[in-house]
Amino acid sequence: MTASPIDRPASDLISIDVADLGAGVTVTAAGEVDSTSAPALRERLDALLDGGAQEITIDLAAVTFLDSAGLCVLAAAYRRASGQDVRLRVLAASRAVIRPLQITGLWNLLQVEKVGAGAPGADSAA
């Protein structure tokens, strides 16, 4: 029997899609955001902030795991966006994402919006 490697490439852990919707840009992440995959998310967000985006929505509805590295990426993006007068929205649906955000205080700081699972980007009554 062959054991699978512990250190998998970031592309195996997360997929990140960027959609330019005219009024803003939506970054949709799916999978696990951890120390291996968080740098890929940071690169995408940094590129958008460097490119002059005025509104960025980070959709985490399909994220199944979020650790401290992912939380740091979100905090850094918030700090940069605030300094550049860019509106940053964060959407979350699962307990795996909501709970770490709440425990760290980022839920309130980022003003995260709870969305219905399976309906990324669609606000639900929380």
Image (spheres, rainbow, N blue to C red):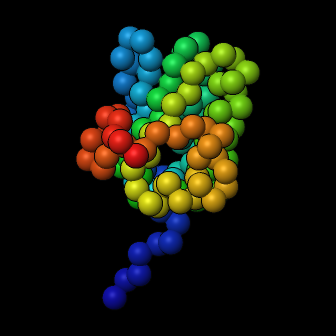
| Residue lying furthest left | 118
Foreground residue among 22 and 122: 122
Residue 52 against residue 42 in the figure, above or below: above
Name the residue located 59 percent from the left edge and 55 percent from the top edge.
102
Give percent across and percent down for residue 56: 50, 25
The residue under the point 31% across, 46% down is: 116
Furthest toward the front, the residue is 125
Which quadrant holds residue 23?
Answer: top left
Residue at the spot 34% in from the left edge and 88% down from the top edge:
1
Horizontal side, residue 87 vs residue 79: left or right: left
Q: Quick check: can you spot residue 10?
A: yes
Of the pair 88 and 116, the residue shown nearer to us: 116
Q: Is residue 98 above or below residue 77?
A: below
In the rendered image of this protein, does residue 2 appear above or below residue 19? below
Depth check: 94 or 44 in front? Answer: 94
> Could you tell me if residue 48 is visible in this image?
no
In the image, residue 94 lies at what x, y percent?
40, 56
